[in-house]
Amino acid sequence: MSMRVAVVAIVLALAACSPEAKAPEAKAPEAAVAAAAPEAAVGTSDAEAAAKLSKLHMFAKYDPARDPEADLKLALDKAKAEHKRVLLDVGGEWCSWCHLIDHYIATRDDVREAFEASFVALKVNYSDENKNEAFIGKYGKVPGYPHFFVLEPDGKLAVSQGTSELEEGRGYNHDRMLAFAKRWVLS
């Protein structure tokens, strides 16, 4: 009986971040997310552009209705202005690990600050509603979710990073998360 339970646990763990999985959402605390989100209208007179830019942060939702090409243009402009790289965070609202990584970053000030110092973050949805395959495919194969692509400010791919390498148990490893973010800060 215990062998059967172990096999079921392994199968469930492997399937946890497949697009078909519908795991309960583990949300980052609202206060941490609000504190980490950029201001909507800083440095711009165009309200529409400001509203679009406000969606470019680590704690935005994966939105199947968003246009990743248009969002990337905004993210690259912002990255150039702020002397940062772009972090494409590929996943979906269905992905429990996507919510876990958001929660991890949002609730650890030093990790959140390191990510904010290095990246303009852009959520890219992958779901049954919109797989964004043409956009994601330009950067390579995604073996699991969430998945990070780091882009230079000119849009060239710097690295494809599986987030499983940053995991520890049912969460993330503090030292690996910090090292990843700090590795990509532009000097």
Image (cartoon, rainbow, N blue to C red):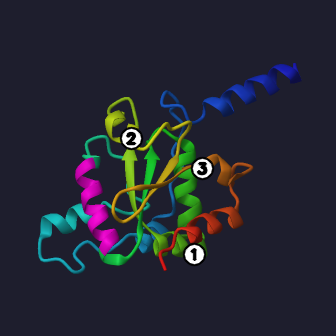
Q: Amino acid at mark 1?
A: Asp
Quick check: is 140 in the magenta stretch?
no
Q: Label 2 belongs to which residue?
A: 136
Question: Does residue 128 lie above or below 101 as drawn?
Answer: above
Q: Amino acid at mark 2?
A: Ile
**Reading the chain from its start, which is encountered first: label 2 or label 1?**
1
Give residue 143's quadrant in the image: top right
Quick check: is 72 in the magenta stretch?
yes
Where residue 73 sits in the image (x, y, percent)?
Answer: 25, 58
Part of the protein shown in magenta: 69-80
Give the residue at x 43% y 74%. Answer: 35
Q: Secondary structure at mark 1?
A: helix
Packing grade of label 2 (10 A; few <14, some 14-19, many >=20) is: some
Predominant SS of the magenta segment: helix
Where residue 122 sits in the image (x, y, percent)?
Answer: 37, 57
Q: Label 1 belongs to which residue?
A: 109
Q: Label 3 belongs to which residue?
A: 163
Cα separation, mark 3 vs mark 1, equals 19 Å
Front of the two marks 3 and 1: 3
- The answer to whether 46 appears left or right of 132 in the picture is left
Please identify the quadrant where the N terminus is shown. Answer: top right
Question: Does residue 177 lie above or below 89 as drawn?
Answer: below
Give the residue at x 14% y 64%. Answer: 48
